[in-house]
Image (cartoon, helix red, strand yellow):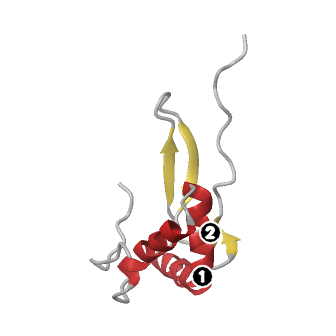
Amino acid sequence: MASDALPPYDGFDRMAIAGTWRTGRAGKTATHTNPHTGETSTEIPLATADELNEAYARATEVQRKDEVVRWHIEESGAAAPAATSGYAVTLRPMSSGGRPGRSAGTVVPPA
């Protein structure tokens, strides 16, 4: 009788940070647990706050309006005017110069 168990996940040992695939250097891992079996699916090395900031800074450097508009069109099927409006909404949290999701200035570790 064949087992219904899925093989463990792999390929989660590296993440894209500032244009390169590398392992997070926080020295901690997050455990992903299969909700149906309770078994560990994979361990994911976590990035440091500096790595997150580096990834964010690099992403904002390379992001271009035409790419974001194209993503809106391809992912939602929106017409170009609606996708352009979506681009403006996407950038709204960054207009004050702050970083989205960083209003408190802390990185909360996983529970």
Residue farthest top in this picture: 1
Frontmost residue, 31 versus 21: 21
Residue type for callout 2: Arg
Instruction: In the rendered view, tell whether residue 98 sits above or below residue 102.
Output: below
Under tag 1, what secondary structure?
A: loop
Residue farthest right in this picture: 2
Image location of residue 52, percent across then percent down: 50, 75
Q: Residue at x 37, y 72 (%)?
A: 107
Residue 13 lies in quadrant: bottom right
Tell me the distance, in whole angstroms, between the alpha carbons under discs 2 and 1: 10 Å
Instruction: In the rendered view, tell whether residue 62 sits above or below residue 7.
Output: below
Label 2 neighbour load within 10 Å: few <14, some 14-19, many 20+: some
Instruction: In the rendered view, tell whether residue 50 sits above or below residue 5.
Output: below
Residue type for callout 1: Arg
Where is mark 1, residue-wise?
Answer: 64
Q: Residue at x 46, y 69 (%)?
A: 86
Image location of residue 40, percent across then percent down: 54, 39
User: In which quadrant of the rendered image does the N terminus lie?
Assistant: top right
Q: Disc number at residue 70?
A: 2
Left or right of 98, for residue 85: right
Instruction: In the rendered view, tell whether residue 92 sits above or below residue 5.
Output: below
Q: Nearer the viewer, mark 2 or mark 1?
A: 2
User: In which quadrant of the rendered image does the C terminus lie?
Assistant: bottom left
Q: Residue at x 52, y 34 (%)?
A: 39
Frontmost residue, 39 versus 87: 87
